[in-house]
Amino acid sequence: MNEQSLWAFLTARAPELWQKTLEHLVLTGVSTGLAVLIGLPLGIWITRNAVARRPVLGVVGIVQTIPSLAMLAFLLPFLGIGAKPAIAALTLYALLPIVRNTYTGLSEVAPDILEAAQGVGFTNRQQLLMVELPLAVPVIVAGVRTAAVIGVGIATLSAFIGAGGLGDFINRGLALNNTRLILLGAIPAALLALLVDAAIGLIERLLRRPQQTTPAT
Amino acid sequence: MCAGKRPVRVNGKHRLIRAVVVALATACGLAAVSPLAGCKRDADATKVHVRIAAKNFTEQFILGELLAQLVEGKTDLAVERNFYLGGTMICHGALVSGEIDVYPEYTGTALTTILKREVLATPDETYSAVAKAYREQFKCEWLSPLGFNNTYAITARETDAQAKNWQTVSDLKREAPSLEAGFTAEFVERPDGYPGLKRKYGFEFGSVRELDAGLMYKALAAGEVDVICAFATDGRIAAYNLVPLEDDKRFFPPYFAAPVVRSAVLQAHPELRNALNGLADKLDDSQMQKLNYEVDEKKRSPADVAREFLRSRGLVS
């Protein structure tokens, strides 16, 4: 028999759940944002620079294979506890999907379109901003979506190092063998992942619409 | 693709695929019957195993090793170690369901977190109450206490305590809203932890960070948090110049450690009782602190530290 009814449990925990969800969003949001700021330029660079391609993709790939808990533990002596090491780790994990998808999206742009752009007289920068990136948007955004969803999942581990988030509930539930607490963290985290994925998908659709309505010059 | 165009190459590919599949299947088959997977099966055939468990912090590893080595040294029984179980309730659940046989528990923890009862005044009352309840409710027995009281201690840095004249937990009340606490996930939820502390002392800390028990001490020493829920027998309190504040309102129960064993196992192997009681009253607070320090700061293995202690006391040859 449960000492507290499910409804009483949820209403008692609601403010804490809200706060932890916000913390979780901040951790994921900031790290995914940073990963885009770093990963997008990196992806563009390796599209232009064939020599850098293998090393960069190799490094971000290897980072991905490091177990998350080990990565967090590794960053502690440098960044202390709390949000800083958590965001650093999450940013590193978000890099691979973003860098790889940026590179793939850009390199898939048909060569004749690039020729046409140069024929029209675009500079390299104009070509990148007005032709290549807009065409690569679907693939790049897919990478950002993957990164964000991975981020929501890994952020649950930040609970061990004092960064907050929904992982706190999971951690507490594990320690006390309390399934309700575990689910209080796990289910919102899963829903958050779905929500984040859908939200980014919506942004992508909004980014694409101007392209379809603008007539070709 | 014309079917008969290159018959030799197609057959070669099929043969290669078949060979790989057979090799993989054989490997899996071997692994399944190998000692790796079936270790428990053939081990049981030759020797009876006592399964000793421990929670997920240093002191528990040391206690687990002490108990395990005593059993190995003084009886014919073999020991299976299940250390780093994720917390009090996981160990307790495993004990009650029969998945483990012994683990070291603290009387206060059993009383408030497992039995969910009110705090009792004295260590003896606490011990009797849990011993009785465990025998009746869980068919488990509490053996003799080891001698130390590993209570929770709200702890701060020495520099802070001296500058702000903090000697008791009540002294924190004035500044509490501006203080950041670093607590374990268990402490934040347990009735003998933060929820009860808040009520008894009538204040809350400005913010609470949930940390792994092993990270708390360093985090406090490094200034990342202002107070922690230290374990009184941790060697790092002295080593990092930390000061445990007096529990002036007597909120925390006594936490005397003792081995808890399933009654069925004791009945089947009476020699186990003597072996496990070999540690009774042998460890006081400062001795336990020293052992913890050896593992936490000097980075020695719990097994080595335990063996050294048992030999020095003549408990094991």
Image (cartoon, grey):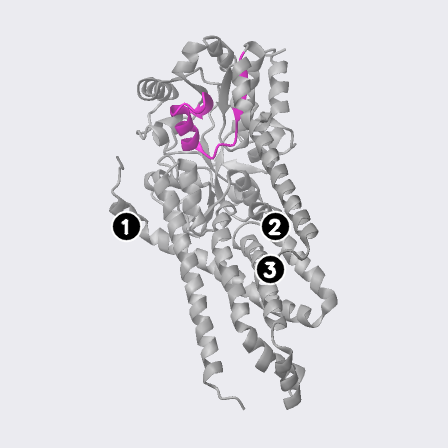
Is A99 in front, or is B246? A99
Percent across and percent down for residue B18 are 62, 42
**Residue in view at x 48 percent, y 47 percent:** A159
The quadrant in which residue B315 appears is top right
Task: Please indicate, yes or no, whether residue A121 appears anywhere in the rendered image.
Answer: no
Q: Earlier in the sequence, mark 3 or mark 2?
A: 2
Q: Earlier in the sequence, mark 2 or mark 1?
A: 1
Percent across and percent down for residue A95 are 59, 60
- Of the 4 image quadrants, the one containing the N terminus of chain B is bottom right
Q: Which mark is residue A11?
A: 1
Is A15 in front, or is A150? A150
Q: Regarding mark 2 in the picture, which secondary structure is present there? A: helix
Q: Which residue is mark 2?
A: A65
Is A119 in front, or is A141? A119
**Residue in view at x 51 percent, y 68 percent:** A141
* Protein chain holding label 3: A
Q: Which mark is residue A31?
A: none
Is A190 in front, or is B313? A190
Percent across and percent down for residue A76 are 59, 48
Percent across and percent down for residue A175 are 43, 37
Q: Earlier in the sequence, mark 3 or mark 1?
A: 1
In three-dimensional space, the C-alpha distance between marks 3 and 2, rounded to whole angstroms, equals: 10 Å
How crowded pointer 1 is (Cα within 10 Å; few <14, some 14-19, many 20+) is rated as: few
Query: Could you tell me the amino acid type at mark 2?
Result: Thr
Residue A214 drawn above or below residue B54: below
Query: Could you tell me the amino acid type at mark 3?
Result: Leu
Q: Which residue is mark 3?
A: A96
In three-dimensional space, the C-alpha distance between marks 2 and 1, rounded to whole angstroms, equals: 40 Å
Q: Which residues are magenta?
A: B77-106
